[in-house]
Image (cartoon, helix red, strand yellow):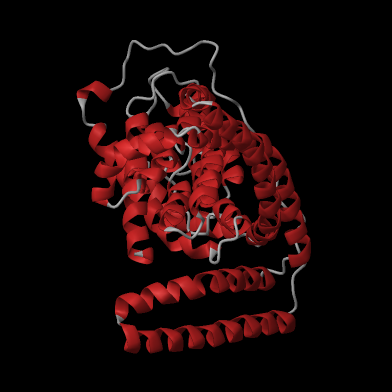
Amino acid sequence: MLNAIWLVLAAGAIVVAAYGGPDVLRAVSDAIFASAKSAVQLVIGLIGVMVFFLGLMRIAFDAGLRDVIARRLTPITRRLFPQVPPDHPAMSAMIMNMASNVLGMGNAATPFGLKAMSELAKLNHHSGSASNAMVLFLAINASAITLLPPLGTVGVRAAANSSDPWAIWMPTLFATICSTLAAVLAYALLGRLPVFRHREELTGDPSAQPIELPDEPPALHPETPAPEAPGPRLLRSAVVWGVLLWLLFFVGSGFAETFRAEGAVDAIRSTLQVWALPLLLIAVLLYGFAKRVRIYDSMVAGGRDALAVAQTIVPYLVVILVAVAMFRASGALDFVIGLIDPVTSRIGVPAEVLPMALIRPLSGSGALGVMGEIFQAHGPDSFIGLLTSTLMGSTETTFYILAVYLGAAGVVDGRHALLACLAGDLAGFVGAVASCHFFFG
């Protein structure tokens, strides 16, 4: 699908430019070189932010925060997946996958997700057809709630010289909540329809067998720290609680002052926008400090992962950004926007963000390129730029997740998994629009 979209953008730009004459063709040619250069510059600006904040997330991982979240998710997953035995490997893999997604670490979540689908396939009594547990797990994965900031999006905004790269954190959180709730609801409702019942005649693809993966990826730091004496442990606790109480005082006093001056809604919005990032930073550092994590070493290890990610996305970003820039320079994008804008503007959706809404379920790297191009055209702090950023983090790459995870389980019939995931994508889009209007006007 993404191949077809890219071909339409590039070939369509040349065809339209041909009708526009030599000047338009020259503009399209200039756009190729300018956008390729800007794509690389965008990645260079992105590296620094990714190194720091992926290092920060590594501290949370090394401190065991993922395990803590996994334990809190256990009662929920047992209710969501009653057909999966609590002590089955599929349940533990699903819990670790969801915990990783909640922390915004999609790369760490993928191995657990593949393991979960492979184990769910062993419980599936309908060969070749996705079980209810598989469908629900896919719906949750494709619309995962992310409590922590979308670091990739924040990094691109910072590289594009945004005055407030973190402004989209709370809108993105609201959008992902809408997306997940809608996906789970769609799973429950669509599963009752006769058309989505298991097809008993399916035998599956003999060449597509469930993938056997290790029970659990190796620990980040397998060595167990030596027991700590009571004195240092008490000192650590005193430092942590002292800093937390100090922060609570300042957050509360600032909220009360804004509440008296501007009202409850503005006080909540202002407090979230001002304090969300500082509280995240200090919370992760204090948690790592309390768990005796070697903070500097963890930051460096996470930074190395960021460098590998940045190297990987360069070709994808250049290719998609060049195609979109060509399409814009030819005038074709303005023509399409002119046709759609009278409809979308009535519901508060600028037509310029629709390319992001269409490409996001298909390709994360493609959506990243579209976002970068929109930032160049409209700026990262315009309403269009803010809404585009929020859409980037509102859902996952739906079709990629379905293809990889169903393939890992050897399933050829996903039943209503696609529709449930697309329902989550639509709800994430609506939630992103609503939250951006609330936070940014």
**Residue shown at the point (71%, 54%) measured from the top left:** 302
The quarter in which the C terminus is drawn is bottom left
Between 198 and 395, which is closer to the camera in this rendering?
395
Between 363 and 208, which is closer to the camera in this rendering?
363
* 205 sits left or right of 283 in the view: left
Residue 82 visible, this orientation: no
**Residue shown at the point (25%, 42%) measured from the top left:** 343
* 313 sits left or right of 402 in the view: right
Compared with 176, 407 (above or below) is: above
Compared with 292, 351 (above or below) is: above
**Residue shown at the point (55%, 66%) measured from the top left:** 163
Residue 50 visible, this orientation: yes
Residue 330 at what x, y percent from top left?
A: 49, 32
Residue at the extreme front: 22
Between 149 and 323, which is closer to the camera in this rendering?
323
* 236 sits left or right of 119 in the view: right
Q: Quadrant of residue 210?
A: top right
**Residue shown at the point (41%, 45%) measured from the top left:** 353
Compared with 222, 299 (above or below) is: below
Residue 175 at what x, y percent from top left?
A: 38, 53
Residue 79 at what x, y percent from top left?
A: 35, 47
Residue 407 at what x, y percent from top left?
A: 51, 23
* 99 sits left or right of 187 in the view: right
Q: How many marks?
A: 0
